[in-house]
Amino acid sequence: MRMAHPTATAVALFTIVVLASCSEFLPHAAVTPRVPPESTVRVDTAPEADLYEVVPGGPPASAPAAPLPGATLRGRASVVREARARLAAHISSTYRIASGSASQIVEHAYQVGAARHLRPTLLLAVIAQESSFRPEAISRVGAVGLMQVRPELHDRRRRRLGLRRPLADPATNIAVGADVLLDCLARSRGNVTQALEKYSGGASDYSAKVAQLESKFERVAQG
């Protein structure tokens, strides 16, 4: 019995020392936040997501669909080629420009439209209203090119987009104009009518005129 007391005391002291040495870690463990399961973590939507729903042709909101069969893809490519050819022929005859120039403008509109999730017919309608498909057009306020962008306002935008050709270059002009239009859409919360009004600087009936032109281009594209 005399040996039991010192042993019990030693065990008690050892326990106190261990607890004291670990006590500095206990508060951190107590406040460590619980990480929610991955399925409950909120992922913010990209700023352009609303525009995709308003401007047809944008990426789907749901998960990507399974790859289409090769025959289906070839069929769709053929439809797009025919639509572009009809548009180029219509623009060439209606606006009296060379067929090669019309084809290039339609090509640029489709490329930029696909890259920026904008309808190519909307871009073509803006071009028709702004410049009647004349790349050399210059307005009385100094706006240049197919989509009438202003060098003092938009040349920095051209450089930001990594474009090396001057603003009057058709491909560059359409790319910069599309970027301006996307900004207008963002500021208008995806409302195309309001965005077109902003793009034009408040020109009277501008959005209605563009809508009428786009409707015509859509009918031509569909044959």
Image (cartoon, grey):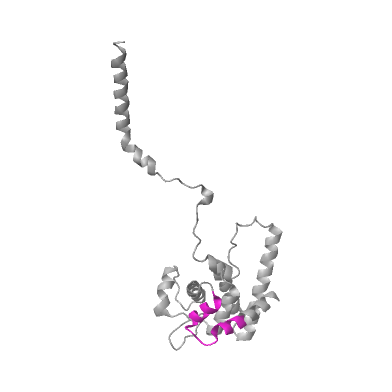
Question: Is residue 193 in the magenta section?
Answer: yes
Q: Which residues are magenta?
A: 191-213
Q: Quadrant of the C terminus?
A: bottom right
Query: As drawn, is 217 to the left or to the right of 183?
Result: right
Residue 76 position (above or below residue 7): below
Q: Position of residue 222 (x, y in %)?
A: 69, 75
What residue appears at the point 54 percent right and 84 percent down from the top-left corner? 206
Residue 58 position (above or below residue 23): below
Q: Is residue 158 visible?
A: yes
Q: Position of residue 113 (x, y in %)?
A: 56, 70
What residue appears at the point 64 percent right and 84 percent down from the top-left corner? 93
Question: Is residue 81 in the magenta section?
Answer: no
Query: As drawn, is 221 to the left or to the right of 157?
Result: right
Q: Position of residue 166 (x, y in %)?
A: 44, 76
Closer-to-camera residue (69/85): 69
Q: Position of residue 71 (x, y in %)?
A: 71, 59
Counting labels gives 0
